[in-house]
Image (tube, rainbow, N blue to C red):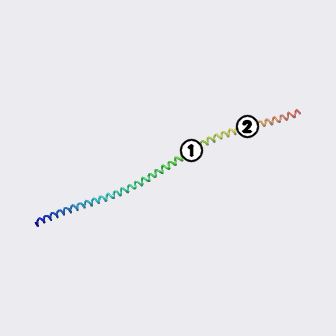
Amino acid sequence: RFISVHEDLQAAERRAWGAQEELLSAYKKLAEAGQEANLLRKQVAAARKTTVEHGQRLVAELNFIENVKLENTVQADIIRSLRAAVSRGEEQAARAVELQQALQASEAMRHALEARSATGARVETRLGTLCEKAIERAA
């Protein structure tokens, strides 16, 4: 009986050693998994940081694009205003040419009238003088 108990103890001891080896192996696997998890956490943190940086760059680029759109809109408005001003300027220039031509025509008519008037006055003066002489002779 003592031998049987001794054998049972030895078998239990072997099982205990086997269990300890399995436990040690499990602890090693758990440690490796923990290291892998820690490495993955670091990679995730780096990926998050990169994602945040990319997001910030995208926001900056979107803001830049919005500013460019706004500047383009403002420039388009300025160009439309300038074109309208040029068009009005061209219209005013054409109207000024018309007015200048009308003024020149008016000046020409005035000079013509003055010339006629002066000729008529000379004729009247001449006629008046002739009439006076004719009256004097007749008297």
Q: On screen, 121 above or below 26?
A: above
Count residues near mark 2 (Cα–Cα under 10 Å), then give few for <14, some for 14-19, many for 20+: few
Which residue was labeled with disc 2?
113
Point out the residue furthest to the right here.
Answer: 139
The structure residue drawn at horizontal position 24% and vertical position 60%, both measured from the top left corner, is: 26
Residue 103 lies, with reference to residue 74, above or below; the image says above
User: Can you say which quadrant of the picture contains the N terminus?
Assistant: bottom left
Q: Residue furthest front?
A: 1
Q: In the image, is 91 to the left or to the right of 106?
A: left
In the figure, residue 33 lies in which quadrant? Answer: bottom left
**Secondary element type, mark 1:** helix
Residue 118 position, x and y percent, is 76, 38
Q: Are marks 2 and 1 in contact (CB under 8 Å)?
A: no
Residue at the bottom extreme, as displayed: 2
Residue beneath disc 1: 84
Mark 1 Cα-neighbour bin, 10 Å: few <14, some 14–19, many ≥20? few
> Foreground: 99 or 5?
5
Q: Quadrant of the C terminus?
A: top right
Mark 2: amino acid: Leu
In percent of the image, x 26 and y 60: which residue is there?
30
Q: Position of residue 91 (x, y in %)?
A: 60, 42
Residue 6 x/y as whole percent: 13, 66
N-terminal of the pair, mark 2 or mark 1, is 1
* Residue at x 56%, y 44% (from the top left corner): 84
Residue 56 horizontal/vertical position (percent):
42, 55
Q: Quadrant of residue 50?
A: bottom left
Count the marks: how many? 2
Numbered tag placed on residue 7 in the rendering: none
Q: Locate residue 35 relative to residue 136 in the image: left or right.
A: left
Residue name at image x 50 percent, y 48 percent: 73
Q: CA distance from mark 2 to mark 1?
A: 42 Å
